[in-house]
Image: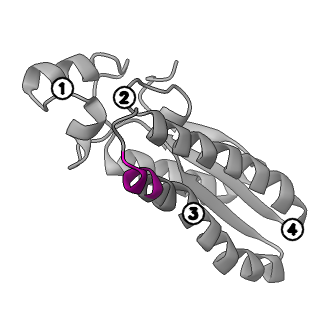
Amino acid sequence: MLEVTEADFDRVFAINVKSIYHMARAVVPIMRAQKRGVIFNVSSTAGLRPRPGLTWYNGSKGAVNLLSKSMAVELGSDGIRVNALCPVMGDTALLESFMGVPDTPENRKKFVGTIPLGRLARPLDVAKAAVFLASDEADFITGAELPVDGGRTV
């Protein structure tokens, strides 16, 4: 926690939080004019169930969740729905950083063992959740934090 530099802290919050500010300024006026829209912000299971060694990342994803809820409250009367997608870790270049240990078969097995469905997230898992939230089938869902996590946050 204390080994993170201020530059790294700023980078995490710029990517995970400030980007939502910029997106909202760009798209909300258009959505308001259309009197409809769907926004989903990409959060993480880290914003729901923080893990040690990732305090500032966890906090940035917690901010994404609260921003999503606040935006849902503020924009609902404009016909705009806002939700947060909260995927568990996937097999990406950042995997080792988020595991906090070397990416060895043994360490990966331990982490995957914490996911009841027994695997890491796949891009298609997150895409399917996003498509659902953007669909008419989800037209009464706003302000939700949707775990796409194979049961990790249960």
Please report whichever mark, 3 or 4, sits nearer to the chain's N-terminal start. Answer: 3
Quarter that holds the N terminus: top left
The quarter of the picture where residue 4 lies is: top left
What secondary structure is the stretch in magenta mostly built from?
Answer: helix
Q: CA distance from mark 2 to mark 4?
A: 39 Å
- Secondary-structure class at tag 4: helix
The quarter of the picture where residue 110 lies is: top left
Residue located at (73% from left, 74% from top): 28
Residue located at (82% from left, 83% from top): 33
Residue 146 as seen in the image, left or right of residue 98: right
The image shows residue 136, relative to residue 118, as above or below, that is: below
Please report whichever mark, 2 or 1, sits nearer to the chain's N-terminal start. Answer: 2
Question: Comparing marks 1 and 3, which lies closer to the viewer?
Answer: 3
Q: Magenta segment range?
A: 5-10
Going by the numbered disc 3, the residue's amino acid type is Lys
Q: Position of residue 115 (x, y in %)?
A: 36, 21
Q: CA distance from mark 3 to mark 4?
A: 23 Å
Q: Which residue is mark 1?
A: 108
Please report whichever mark, 1 or 3, sits nearer to the chain's N-terminal start. Answer: 3
Disc number for residue 53: 2
Q: Which residue is mark 3?
A: 18
Question: Comparing marks 2 and 4, which lies closer to the viewer?
Answer: 2
Q: Position of residue 123 (x, y in %)?
A: 34, 51
The image shows residue 110, relative to residue 142, as above or below, that is: above
Q: Is residue 21 magenta?
A: no
Question: Comparing marks 2 and 1, which lies closer to the viewer?
Answer: 2
Going by the numbered disc 4, the residue's amino acid type is Asp
Residue located at (46% from left, 56% from top): 10
- Secondary-structure class at tag 3: helix
Q: Which residue is mark 4?
A: 78
The image shows residue 104, relative to residue 36, as above or below, that is: above
